[in-house]
Image: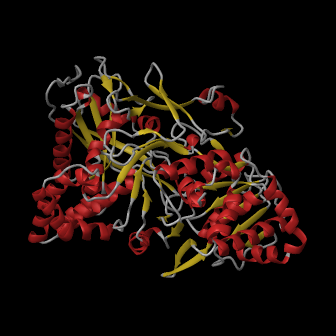
Amino acid sequence: MTDQQTPAGALHSIPALLARNVALFGDRPAYREKEFGIWQSWTWAEAAEEIRALALGMLVLGLRQGDYVAVIGRNRPAHYWSMIAAQMCGAIPVPLYQDAVAEEMAYVLEHCGARFVICGDQEQVDKVLEVEESVKGIQRILYNDKRGMRKYDHSRMNSIADTQDQGRAAEPRLGLELDARIAALDESSICVMLYTSGTTGKPKGVVLSNRNIIETAKNTCDFDRLTMREEIVAYLPMAWVGDFIFSMGQALWAGFTVNCPESAHTMATDTREIGPTYFFAPPRVFEGQLTSVMIRMEDAGRVKKWLFDRFMKIARRVGPALLDGETVGFTDRLAYGLGKLLVYGPLKNTLGYSRIRVGYTAGEAIGPEIFDFYRSLGINLKQLYGQTEASVFITQQPDGQVRSDTVGVPSPEVEVKIAENGEVFYRSPGTFVEYYKNPDSTASTKDPDGWVATGDAGFFEESTGHLRIIDRAKDVGKMADGSMFAPKYVENKLKFFPNILEAVVLGNNRDYCTVMINIDLNAVGNWAERNNIAYASYQELAAHPQIYAAIRTHVEEVNASVAEDEMLSNCQIHRFLVLHKELDPDDGEMTRTRKVRRAVISEKFADLVGALYDGSDSIYTETEVTYEDGRKGKIKATLRIEDVQVFGGAVQQKVAAQ
């Protein structure tokens, strides 16, 4: 039996997986971190020693079994180690979003009752200290980066390094106690508590057991044949279940290397240097990268632009077929090979994707045009469907069965069914234990037989057995004429255009659909620079007449595409406006994972919604915003509203006021 075939039942916990990895391949790299431009590396044996020292240090500081340990900071080996160390002590790690404002942080810290808080740096420490008046129970603050911390009150603060030194000194005294706590862990022990994004209300604490994480990690590693030789880049929020399953669950199960970039600003360079073989990103990352590519091509010379356009046409026609092992003619193969030499290869290298063997996107639906672009380059990008309550995986796309309009087949050991109202239900080894301190929500989400309501609407294709997700069940509605309203379907098509960062489609119970749009400041700002157009703010650029003309063209292109879908043709856009501000998590308009809070937007921008449907050509509005330092302010603007052309069977209807 190889290390990859070890039964999950023989490994009851994350610390047990760590010990297994040390025994089987202790000298292989487990973690890397880039700091001050230099990559540092730890083998599994070295990482295990660091983790044990930290766990012993936590015991010295009084960490008890059953305590909750909050972890706040960017992706760093020490933060992953602190979660494993907490588990060794019988405590439960609770990672938080590092960009959470104090109010959001206070809610989670109070709700979980954290006694220990692990902070990445001075900024996170300051936020914890700021909320301590309203949050009771925090007894110890540990921090990783010592910079700026010298003059703080250290009566109950410790650096992680100093805590480890205390732990090493306490090995003779507390070693047996730590071993006993590790031995007490089993598959039902809580592995982690992760908070939902809170799209429709307060975040809920999702309790996941060792069995949830380990069984899911084993099954999905087997599905994609992941081994100890994989390289991943850990850059997504540690509070997000996607990062936990990839950088903790699968990394510990398969034994592959977790690489932590220096910062968000160096992410592109760091990814190129690592050359990940296994990669995950939500659609917004791929959308942003595609926008950057298109911007660079607009700035490129005539020959380079001609080569890109010519070979990308070949790639869109041939690339996905080659990736799926289909038969492709000799001439097309030759043309694609030349394109790989001149365009696709250099482009993949620039993105850091040259070595990707398996790539996934999830979190929300990705636009088919964006998805097909990456696959046309020869990148094995696939879709999965999941949620926090499932330990991520519900469905996955097997190699050779990848399409942009489905999310694949049920993951190993996952059962999926569709209710009469179209809602998707599942049950699996990854199904969460409960919502912490919320039995009513637990009971309404998970029935006694273990079936979980996803809140998403979808159906299985009879011919392929693949699942198609239409939209969030609560967002799928009806137009006034009874036809289906599915806003996300249209929004994803709009976001394919580099100029459009975000779109919010309206139309439930209405005669026709409208949309509010955020421009992409990078893409549009680049256009303005190339055309010598001066602007002083996002608001001024968003209102520029040429921007409105470009957006109108994009909306009409999407309408032409939507008109071809018989079921959703009435979701064509009739009127639009460009918002005067970017939708922002700090203003409550989006979650920390960049999901639109539709109810908040409908209420906050009620005047704009009204103007989109009452025939107005413009609307004056004032909107409260939150600045980076936490201050509140208001921005004022007069927004223009424009009509656009619709196509095919969707008959443009106007309210009587028009």
Q: Is residue 604 visible?
A: yes
Q: Position of residue 268 (x, y in %)?
A: 38, 69
411 left or right, relative to 196:
left
Q: Position of residue 437 (x, y in %)?
A: 72, 38
Dividing the picture into quadrants, the one containing residue 120 is bottom right
Q: Quadrant of the N terminus?
A: bottom right
Q: Residue at x 62, y 30 (%)?
A: 450
Q: Nearer the viewer, residue 397 or 125?
A: 397
* Total number of numbered discs in the rendering: 0
Q: Position of residue 285 (x, y in %)?
A: 38, 57
In this picture, is 378 found above or below 440? below
Q: Quadrant of the C terminus?
A: top left
Q: Nearer the viewer, residue 567 or 199?
A: 567
431 left or right, relative to 457:
right
Q: Nearer the viewer, residue 589 or 427?
A: 427
Q: Is residue 532 visible?
A: no
Report the residue that reaches farthest toward the right.
173
Q: Nearer the viewer, residue 41 or 116?
A: 41
Q: Residue at x 44, y 51 (%)?
A: 584
Report the residue that reaches farthest toward the front.
1
508 left or right, relative to 86:
left
Q: Residue at x 17, y 23 (%)?
A: 651
Q: Position of residue 344 (x, y in %)?
A: 23, 65
Q: Residue at x 70, y 54 (%)?
A: 13
Q: What color scheme is it?
A: secondary structure
